[in-house]
Image (spheres, grey):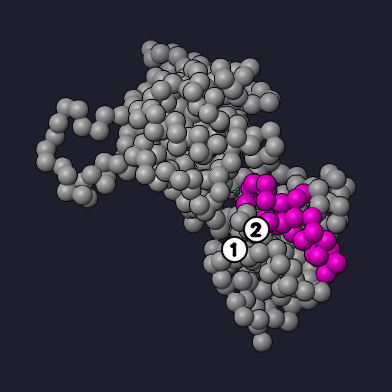
Amino acid sequence: MAPKGWTVHNPDGDHRVIVTKDLPGRRWLDILTAAGCRVEVCTSDDVLTVDEIAEHVGVACDGVIGQLTEDWNADLFGVLAAAGVTAYSNYAVGYNNVDVAGATAAGIPVGNTPGVLTETTAEMALALTFSAGRRVVEADRFMRGGAYHGWLPTMFMGKRFHGGTVGIVGAGRIGAAYGRMMVEGHKMNLVYFDLYPNETLERYIEEYSAFLVDRGEAPVTCSRTDTIEELLALSDIVSLHTVLDDSTHHLINAERLAAMKPDAILVNSSRGPIIDEAALVEHCRAFPLFTAGLDVFEDEPAMKPGLADLDNVVIVPHIASATYWTREGMATLAAANVAAILQGYPLWTGDDVLPFLSGDVPETAPSIVNAAELELH
Ligand code: DGY
């Protein structure tokens, strides 16, 4: 009989795989059962603690798919290794909740799910940008509250994007996709701050600018700033797309908020602790024309006191990747990571992960973040 709160699929499978939340779609489950896995899925919506996970793993387990809400620390990887686990995948592209060094020390490959969140997450960053800058949620509340008694010249004025400057902090896959959407859609100039130049993005915008000029329109520009302060001072909109680590914790603090334009828009769809949220609350109180759009929070799921009372902040519950296509794609990649490692398949070397999403599943692991450390090929 299944333990309380867990559903078992393919009970006679040879490899025991535990999945700490039910995942969307069916392809992920088909991949695991085709690989001979008995799949145990936790049916509770509660975040599992380290102890609860360790207890369920027990003494014999082969693979695990975990959530970004769980603390996959070194002790837990010790428990997994002792139980015989040889494959872990996070159901997320980000893995700041995973002690990768601890997993590596325990000899366990860590998978993630890149390549299926890019446009989806960038689109939500765009939605937050517009909602904040054009006061969509505040105006919606106004309408529902029956407060609209007729058009007025000064009602709910917001910020125009067209021709302004958009700044992206972190010009990786998602940041660059957001940047392109803002430049192409709204003819904005782009500045970015990143440890490394993104030459592909720069070339893309240079070519787009040449296309505009050919059509008799004004050019657009793209440049990398030397400092984040420079980006903050230049930008009408700042969107955060960096990973969370020690170097980016509270990257946007009180001083840096003060360095932004007083009517700027700040968007965060990466990880909450990148912003000092208490400082943001103070800043938004002091500068009512400043707006923010947040998908993630410092103490998620909690918010810092005062945040939810601010009209100039739009808040959504970490749903930037929440489209059917993306969430099912993430499930597919997480399952393919675990199934491939359990079957001894090599690593994927293709440019993108689309071949995993339909048809025959490639006999490779799509994305293992500690492959080099574990000398997996
Ligand atoms: C991720 O994959 O890291 C996202 O935060 C989930 O949407």
Left or right, 342 with respect to 244, comes to right
- Say which label, 1 or 2, has the lower sequence index: 1
Image-quadrant location for residue 350:
top right
Q: How many marks?
A: 2
Residue 234: where, in percent of width, then height?
49, 17
Whole-number angstrom distance, CA of label 1 to CA of label 2: 7 Å
CB contact under 8 Å: marks 1 and 2: yes
Query: Is disc 1 surrounded by few (<14), some (14 to 19) or many (20+) residues within 10 Å?
Result: some
Location of mark 1 (residue): 47
Query: In x, y percent, where is residue 46?
Result: 56, 66
In-front residue for pair 26/24: 24
Residue 228 % position (x, y): 59, 22
Q: Amino acid at mark 2?
A: Glu
Q: Residue furthest left?
A: 150
> Mark 2: which secondary structure?
loop
Q: Quadrant of residue 137?
A: top left
* Residue occupying image coordinates x 63% and y 71%: 41
Q: Is residue 205 within the magenta segment? A: no
Task: Find residue 70 and name its label.
Answer: 2
Identify the residue at horizontal 54%, vertical 24% (top origin). Answer: 255
